[in-house]
């Protein structure tokens, strides 16, 4: 069998070209499948997780005062609740300027 009698067979270069084309087409199809999975499965799942937790369960505006506040195991009085609320919502104290007395080095 000589190299001159290869008229029915493809050359090595043509086979390599077909294989590279196959890899490119496979990568494009795989990328499309991944994008479909992301947009149909994962993104809606993240949206469902956010809807499952009611906003009132987080502390902050709208969430303060919705749960029972206790002091030493008993329900807090309205005055105690107000004092606790003032402590929670107290603005932070300003930091001393660098080099000012009392500033940490």
Image (cartoon, rainbow, N blue to C red):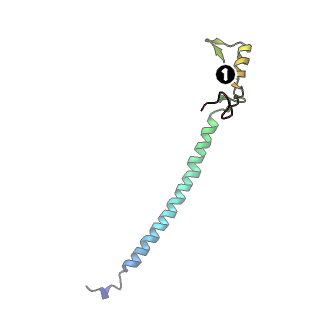
Q: Is residue 85 above or below residue 76?
A: below
Q: In the image shown, does 87 or 42 lie closer to the viewer?
A: 87
Count every numbered label the image shows and give the total.
Answer: 1
Residue ID at (56%, 55%): 36
Local packing at callout 1 (Cα closer than 10 Å; few below 14, some 14-19, many 20+) is few
Where residue 28 appears, as percent x and y from the top left, is: 52, 64
Q: In the image shown, does 102 or 67 lie closer to the viewer?
A: 102
Quarter of the figure that contains the N terminus: bottom left
Q: Is residue 40 left or right of residue 97?
A: left
Q: Is residue 19 above or below residue 9?
A: above
Q: Secondary structure at mark 1?
A: loop
Q: In the image shown, does 84 or 95 lie closer to the viewer?
A: 95
Where residue 88 appears, as percent x and y from the top left, is: 68, 24
Q: Is residue 4 left or right of residue 103?
A: left
Q: Is residue 23 left or right of residue 9?
A: right
Q: In the image shown, does 28 or 105 lie closer to the viewer?
A: 105
Question: In the current view of this chain or complex, which residue is farthest to the bottom?
Answer: 4
Residue ID at (66%, 18%): 69
Residue ID at (48%, 67%): 24
Q: Which residue is mark 1?
A: 67
């Amino acid at each position: 069998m000589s190299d001159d009698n290869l008229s029915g067979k493809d050359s090595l270069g043509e086979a390599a070209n077909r294989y590279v084309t196959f890899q490119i087409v496979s990568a494009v199809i795989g990328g499309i499948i991944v994008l479909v999975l992301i947009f149909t499965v994962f993104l809606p799942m993240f949206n469902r997780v956010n809807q499952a937790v009611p906003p009132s369960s987080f502390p902050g505006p709208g969430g303060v005062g919705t749960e029972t506040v206790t002091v030493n195991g008993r329900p807090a009085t309205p005055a105690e609740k107000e004092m606790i609320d003032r402590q929670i919502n107290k603005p932070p104290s300003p930091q001393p300027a660098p080099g000012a007395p009392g500033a940490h080095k």
